[in-house]
Image (cartoon, rainbow, N blue to C red):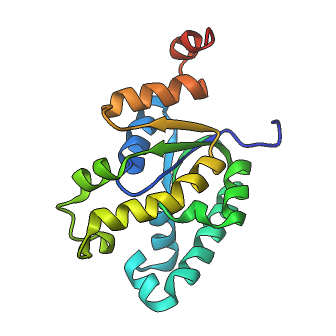
């Protein structure tokens, strides 16, 4: 474990709360938040949509791998929020493990749909039957997220404070919460 960095990495499907949990967890633990999608956009000087249009999905996935490798070179403990597709590459899953503790925010298709149904910036939801597409993708991705994860946190029916408290307690970021969990 000494070679492993002490970052907290948030993975999961879109709408699972990675961004919001990441922001709130970074405040609570006083650690910098790095969002891999924003990191890539900054590095490339263009949006994810523009990258997909120009380089395609495979080009973007290579950029995600490069972003993870650069994060391995950074010092200090960080909260890292990943794009929903990032763990789908085996190389990325291995890099995530090197980066720190991987937390899978598991969410149901119904919760994803409810959270994102008004979001017209998500191509996935512009389909004829978005719920069917969400279910199809979750069926493919959830086993991969699970395999990559050190910790799984179910987010359905929980508010963000509950989710953050659970993560902080398990990862040991807060002594009083961590102590409560040592009796498990």
Image quadrant where one finds the N terminus = top right
**Where residue 160 appears, x then y in whole percent?**
33, 34
Specify whether 98 is left or right of 103. Answer: right
Give the number of marks: 0
> Please, which residue is most extreme toward the bottom here?
54
* Furthest-right residue in this view: 2
What residue sits 29% from the left and 50% below the top? 110
Q: Position of residue 32 (x, y in %)?
A: 51, 44
Residue 133 at what x, y percent from top left?
Answer: 35, 68
**Depth order, front residue of 161/184:** 184
Rendered residue at 40%/41% (across/down): 21
Of 46 and 148, nearer the camera is 148
- Whether residue 137 can be seen here: yes
Q: Quadrant of the C terminus?
A: top right
Whether residue 47 is visible here, answered yes or no, is no
- Relative image position of residue 112 (x, y in whole percent): 31, 53
Determine which quarter of the picture holds residue 100: top right
Residue sitting at 38 percent across and 79 percent down? 49
Answer with left or right where residue 157 lies relative to residue 16.
Answer: left
Q: Quadrant of residue 22?
A: top left
Farthest left residue? 118
């Amino acid at each position: 474990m000494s070679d492993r960095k002490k970052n907290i990495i948030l993975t999961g499907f879109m709408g699972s709360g990675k961004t919001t949990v990441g922001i709130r967890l970074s405040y609570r633990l006083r650690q910098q938040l790095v969002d891999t999608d924003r990191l890539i956009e900054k590095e490339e000087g263009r949006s994810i949509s523009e990258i997909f249009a120009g380089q395609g999905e495979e080009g973007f996935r290579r950029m995600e791998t490069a972003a993870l490798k650069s994060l391995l070179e950074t010092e200090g403990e960080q909260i890292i929020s990943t794009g929903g597709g990032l763990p789908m590459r085996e190389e990325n899953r291995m890099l995530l493990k090197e980066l720190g503790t991987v937390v899978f925010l598991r969410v149901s298709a119904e919760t994803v749909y409810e959270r994102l149904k008004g979001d017209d910036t998500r191509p996935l939801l512009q389909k004829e039957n978005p719920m069917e597409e969400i279910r199809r993708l979750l069926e493919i991705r959830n086993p991969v997220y699970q395999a990559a994860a050190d910790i799984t946190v179910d987010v359905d029916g929980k508010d963000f404070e509950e989710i953050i408290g659970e993560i902080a307690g398990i990862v040991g970021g807060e002594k009083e919460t961590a102590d409560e969990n040592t009796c498990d």
